[in-house]
Amino acid sequence: MNITGGGIGCLPSNWGEAAAISSSSSSSSVDRVSAHRGPDNASPIPANYVCKPGASKPASSTHPNVMILGDSVSIGYTPPTATALASKAFVQHSPWDTRGGGSGTTSYGLACLPNLVRTSMGEPVHWDVIAFNYGLHDLDPAIASQEQYEAELKEIATKLDQYTTRRLYALTTPYMPDKTQGIPIVQDLNTRAIAVMKDLGIPVVDLYSAVTDVCGDVYTNCTICRKTPCSYHYTPEGYEDIAKVLAPAIEALLPAMK
């Protein structure tokens, strides 16, 4: 598993000076940058992170604005979710990333949050709904303990309140190569996430069950998996199944049309 996600994010023109960016890069590593300040001189972003750009397009002036913040699986289910809600909201993914690991680990998401909540041009947005998820990039205990995951997720969820009217947490989808070996790490992280969201009063949508309802509680192969044996990602039909669960949960939180 490549937990770095690969690729280099863009720094909008209104960011402070960034120093010591490595001139070499590869598809398996993120270029490193010394500490620099985020938009409007926000808290410094630690070294070893180059933040990807936020949502690709400006906010809508006619529809409620929805941001889906998450990993590569969320990149997959954003288009069918956006289609399902097209008449009711303008849905975008952050970061603007169609190939890499999206917003990666909780550590990355926390460090880069001031960038991720803006558009790719650095424009501030007060989102009507932010649906967010972290988990698949936090499975390796060598990267972060479950306690660290929980603490950082809580900090992300708390900070998101200043950027949105409503927050919605999406449970992490299954990773069966661990589950079939008797390691229920995704379910353990989801249990911690549910507790965090309960404390903060944030509703939760169960995308884990959106998959297991189709594939079963424990599986190796499934018709909606992109690979055989199943791993992280899904076919277009699989992402449609997930969107059928996510879209109504977002819709329930939307304000009236502008």
Image: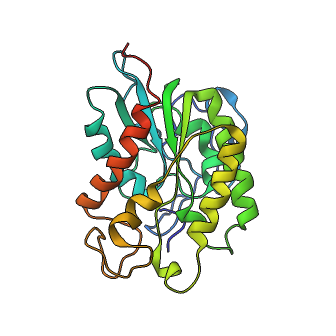
Between 181 and 145, the one nearer to me in the picture: 181
Query: Residue 219: which quarter of the image?
Result: bottom left
Between 1 and 184, the one nearer to me in the picture: 184
Count up the numbered dots.
Answer: 0
Picture coordinates of residue 104 (x, y %)?
Answer: 54, 57
- Is residue 179 shown left or right of residue 96? right
> Who's the residue at 40% across and 74% down the image?
231
Query: Residue 221: which quarter of the image?
Result: bottom left
- Is residue 186 shown left or right of residue 229? right
Considering only vertical position in the picture, is 69 above or below 108? above
> Who's the residue at 46% across and 53% down the image?
102
- Is residue 242 shown left or right of residue 196? left
> Who's the residue at 71% across and 56% down the image?
150
Between 1 and 241, the one nearer to me in the picture: 241
Considering only vertical position in the picture, is 50 above or below 234? above
Picture coordinates of residue 179 (x, y %)?
Answer: 52, 79
Considering only vertical position in the picture, is 86 above or below 94? above
Picture coordinates of residue 159 (x, y %)?
Answer: 68, 36
> In this rendering, does residue 57 appear at all?
yes
> Who's the residue at 38% across and 73% down the image?
216
Picture coordinates of residue 65 (x, y %)?
Answer: 42, 26
Q: How is the image coloured?
A: rainbow
Outermost residue toward the top in this view: 258
> In this rendering, does residue 56 appear at all?
no
> Quadrant location of the C terminus?
top left
